[in-house]
């Protein structure tokens, strides 16, 4: 699984370097974090509907607003995960040497799969 995500990251970095000269790091981490955030939301929807009621409501505290919940449970973990996967100690350079880019095919499949799975979970559950 890590190998697949590494290939997706390499594809995203390669495409972002071509399209965005100056801000490719920022754009890469934002796009990858956005779709990883959607994956986290999909997992939360599935867990909420599959687990019993007592275990499924683990993140529904009434004291937090929806914006704080989204930041705390989805956005910040996705951003930190992508930072440590790609940019900590310039890991993207090692990944670019290890894997070859596939002209945006992997990142496009990842985006389509993420969006489809999210919509399926939203409308089914």
Image: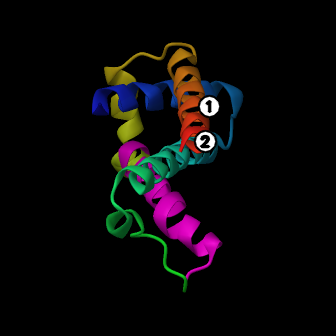
Q: Residues within 10 Å of mark 1 (few under 14, many from 20)?
A: many
Crowd class of label 2 (few under 14; some 14 to 19; many from 20; radius 10 Å): some
In the image, is residue 92 part of the stretch drawn in magenta?
no
State how the image is colored: rainbow
Mark 2 in CB contact with mark 1 (< 8 angstroms): yes
Looking at the image, residue 66 lies above or below residue 62: above
Q: Secondary structure at mark 1?
A: helix
Residue 38 position in % (x across, y down):
55, 46
In the rendered image, residue 121, in percent from the top left (x then y), is placed at: 54, 40
Q: Position of residue 50 (x, y in %)?
A: 37, 50
Dominant SS in magenta: helix
Label drawn at residue 31: 2
* Residue 66, horizontal then vertical, whole percent: 62, 71
**19 left or right of 2?**
right
Instruction: Say the numbered circle drawn on residue 16.
Output: 1
Q: How far apart, in angstroms, are the residues tagged by discs 2 and 1?
A: 10 Å
Q: Residue at x 53, y 47 (%)?
A: 33
**Which residues are the magenta region?**
64-86
Can you say whether 37 is above or below 111 in the image? below
In the rendered image, which quarter contains the N terminus?
top left
Does residue 16 appear left or right of residue 50 in this picture? right
């Amino acid at each position: 699984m890590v190998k697949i995500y590494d290939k997706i990251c390499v594809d995203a970095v390669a495409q972002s370097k071509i399209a965005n000269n100056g801000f490719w790091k920022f754009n890469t981490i934002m796009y990858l974090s956005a779709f990883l955030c959607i994956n986290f939301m999909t997992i939360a929807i599935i867990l909420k509907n599959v687990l019993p009621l007592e275990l499924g409501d683990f993140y529904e505290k009434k004291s937090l607003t929806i914006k704080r919940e989204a930041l705390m449970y989805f956005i910040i973990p996705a951003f930190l995960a992508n930072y440590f996967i790609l940019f900590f100690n310039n890991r993207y350079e090692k990944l670019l040497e290890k894997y070859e880019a596939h002209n945006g095919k992997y990142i496009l499949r990842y985006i389509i799969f993420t969006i489809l799975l999210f919509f399926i979970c939203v409308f089914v559950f």
